Amino acid sequence: MCGINGFNWKDEELIKKMNERIRHRGPDDEGYYVDDNVSLGNVRLSIIDLSKAGHQPMCNETEDIWIVYNGEIYNYMELRKELEEKGHIFKSNTDTEVIIHSYEEWGTECVEKFNGMWAFAIYDKRKNILFLSRDRFGIKPLYYYIDDDKFIFSSEIKAILLHNIARAPNDEIIFDFLCFDLIDHTEYTFFKNIMRIMPGNNAIFDIENKKLKIWRYYNLKEKIDKMTKEKKKFYIDKEKEKFKHMLFTAVKRRLIADVPVGSCLSGGLDSSSIVCIMRKIDKDGQIKAFSLVFPGHKIDESKYQKVIVEKCNTMWHSTTFTANDLLNDLEDLIWTQEEPFGTLSIYGQYRVMKLAKENGMKVLLDGQGSDEILAGYHHFFGDYYYELLKDGKWKTLLEEVISYYKLHGNLKPLLYMFLKILPKNIIKKLWSKRIKYLKKEFISLISKRRTKDIMWDVSTLNKSLYLAEIYYSLPRLLRFEDKNAMRWSIESRVPFCDHEVVEYVLCLPSNFKIKKGKTKIILREAMRDILPKEIINRHDKIAFATPDKYLLRTPQGIELAKKIIYSESFKKRRYWNHDVIKKMFQQHIYGKKNYEKILWKVIILELWLRRYIDECKK
């Protein structure tokens, strides 16, 4: 696990500065390669082959192919064996070297053989090109800047900003964020002219012609469609065993390391499954689990975490935070994330990763990605209801509504289903009330852009899950995960994002995910003999929740918000109506209404603008 940097000219000092800027991603080693055409840099977090043989940039035997790489290829040993049979000779035990020889053998199509997470750049001196690639779901980040002469890339935006380039906010992405709650959904970032290589994409930069070509090598929809056509009938008893085997394989792959591997533990179904599988795989080894707790709050999950800790005999470490902790760390969190975010739940994750660092960990497994493929969020019930309604399955729909109400005590998914039935013009009017805090001039200026909330056009649960995987929630969650983990030099691995698991689950029928008011049916069935009943029978959804609304009602939170909302810079922003925001703030702190989501969004955006945009103008 590392951080990578590079650009298309010779400057040894500048590549060293870029390395230093992202030192947190790789504190164990540093390297750079410079010639007349390129400058490549790497900072290394040593996970596999801790020796000097893993030093990067790394080259082949003839020194005409160089690589800087961030990630892990979990099937690298199988690929190495195949490559050795073809005559390739290895000098290290790293997966980095496997990528080099895979590129030599199969060209840019080598990435289709990889199971893992990656962002890398290969300098092919023979072809005078830079070949860049990002893993299928974008677990590892890769950003770039390009103009007529310069091509710059890095694992983090802050390293690119060391270059002499114009720094300005991307108002269209800010609009998507404020209007639709969309982030990390396109190749454009919050920085104008700084882009991201999208998940499942390759790119080639021609050094001589200074042209960049990007193409998609992985299409999840095509994979799902093909698998669905090949298999028409599904039986839960058979499929749960297949899923169980695949999940065990995915976890086992992610235990490959030359350092100890621990796990996040929220107490929910996903992380609990991972910890229990880890214990099944290694019956006697030490497992460290790291949790977020909130004693005395409804969102506290420590009683569930204790159940898993006792069952799996794990070493348990927990952390919490106060309003003062948040205020002290907020600027660093914004610096860490590089782009705005809409909820403080990621601060909880930040604290867990910090805790792991303090306890000597380098690698953690996490349950990220399960909710997107297994319908873990409760709004997915509305999609399932709509599917049943559209298909004329009235009896099943009624049974599902009744079951949900008995378990959860409300009919919120039914409301979501009705919203999907409403004419588009009514939905648009309802949505416009949610963005009344934005300036009309800003809305009229940007609203003609093509981006829209396409979830309202979804007609089946599986289509909704697919969009969550590639467009809505997972891209942002993976960004949060990577930045929070690497801030503390932690490698985070996500078994539920194994592409084989994702493809398989997304082609299963809807009632294998939602049934009788419950989510994640096939996971519950697969883990029934492994997880404690207290976890199997959980039906609430908390995850890494944080008490956001209460923080803005504490004296410290109110003071922070006042300093920002009443500031001159906040008043002058072209995005929001200051008077409306001020009124929302007053209603929130006095408990009349809950505007936590809007208030935190504008506060975080304002702090991001100050940190990343305004400061460079001083």
Image (cartoon, helix red, strand yellow):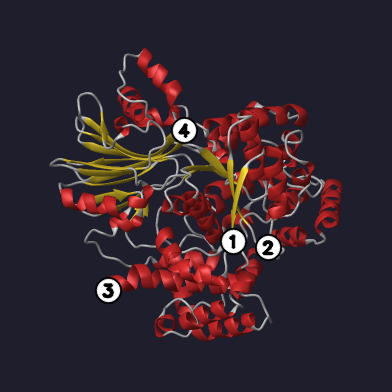
Image depth: mark 2 or mark 4 in front:
2
- Label 1, label 3: how far apart the Cα atoms are: 37 Å
Give the number of the disc on residue 617.
3
Q: Secondary structure at mark 2?
A: loop
Q: Which residue bears the numbered disc 2? A: 295
**Rendered view: 239 above or below 458:** above
Residue that appears at 60% across and 68% down: 548
Quarter of the figure with residue 567: bottom left
Give the number of the disc on residue 257.
4
**Could you classify mark 3 by the number of other residues whose Cα lies within 10 Å: few (under 14), some (14-19), or many (20 or more)?**
few
Q: How far from the left and from the top, in percent, is residue 496? A: 58, 40
Whether tag 2 and tag 3 are in contact, CB under 8 A, the answer is no
Q: How far from the left and from the top, in percent, is residue 596? A: 60, 72
Q: Which comes before the other along the chain, label 1 or label 4?
A: 4
Q: Secondary structure at mark 1?
A: loop
> 185 or 125, which lies in front?
125
Q: Secondary structure at mark 4?
A: loop
Q: Which comes before the other along the chain, label 1 or label 3?
A: 1
Mark 1: amino acid: Thr
- Label 2, label 4: how far apart the Cα atoms are: 34 Å
- Label 2, label 3: how far apart the Cα atoms are: 44 Å
Q: Which comes before the other along the chain, label 4 or label 3?
A: 4
Q: Which comes before the other along the chain, label 2 or label 4?
A: 4
Q: How far from the left and from the top, in percent, is residue 486? A: 43, 50
